Amino acid sequence: MKSNKVLGFEKTEMEAMVESLNLLLANLHVHYQKLRNYHWNVTGGEFFEIHELTEVEYNQVLTEIDDVAERIRVFGAYPMSTLKEYLSKSEIKETKVKHNAKEIVKEILDDFGVLISLMIDTIELTQDMGDVSTNEMLTGFMKRREKMHWMLNAFITE
């Protein structure tokens, strides 16, 4: 008897995972571009700190984007890949904030909230379907982001 499973997963499970990962991918892309904007355009007395921080962060996010897209390919699907798709699906929106350090950090923290929420939703799917690999990937993303959340909150707390 031939199994309908691929990699141990049902087709409907993989479709749900791909949908969730594509939503995360869209949000990561918009977040990434906002970080680039902040890196290029920050002004004020904390320029050097935010310039450096955003460069480190956008490089991390770029790696996450690649990991998520490649995970989608593992499931036999194609990741979203156009700016139009990202902007239409992303809960994170392009920035309109001024370019001072505290506003930038507050905006990054808001984006982290969206990203962490999406990661939690996707991790719940991984648990339901027994997808250890995607679970570990996203758990690592969350762990790093939670630590950054703490540090950024410390930066804006007076």
Image (cartoon, grey):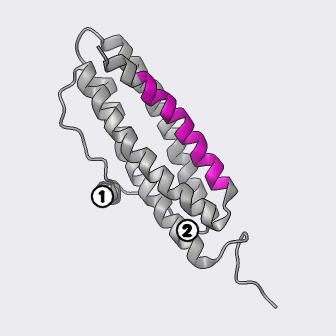
Closer to the camera, 39 or 128? 128
| For the residues bearing labels 2 and 1, Cβ distance under 8 angstroms | no
Disc 2 target residue: 77
Q: Position of residue 131 (x, y in %)?
A: 66, 61
| Residue 109 x %, y % | 35, 34
Q: Which residues are magenta?
A: 133-151
Label 1 sits on what residue type? Lys
Task: Give, as a three-letter code, the residue at label 2.
Answer: Ala
Q: Quadrant of the C terminus?
A: top left
Residue 121 location, x and y as percent? 48, 57
Locate residue 96: give its quadrant: top left
Side of 136 relative to 147 (left or right): right
What residue did someone put label 1 on? 84
Dividing the picture into quarters, in which one does residue 103 lie? top left
User: Is 103 colored magenta in this rendering?
Assistant: no
Q: Is residue 28 visible?
A: no
Secondary structure of the residue carrying numbered label 1: helix
Q: Give the secondary structure at mark 2.
A: loop
Q: Is residue 123 above or below residue 45?
A: below
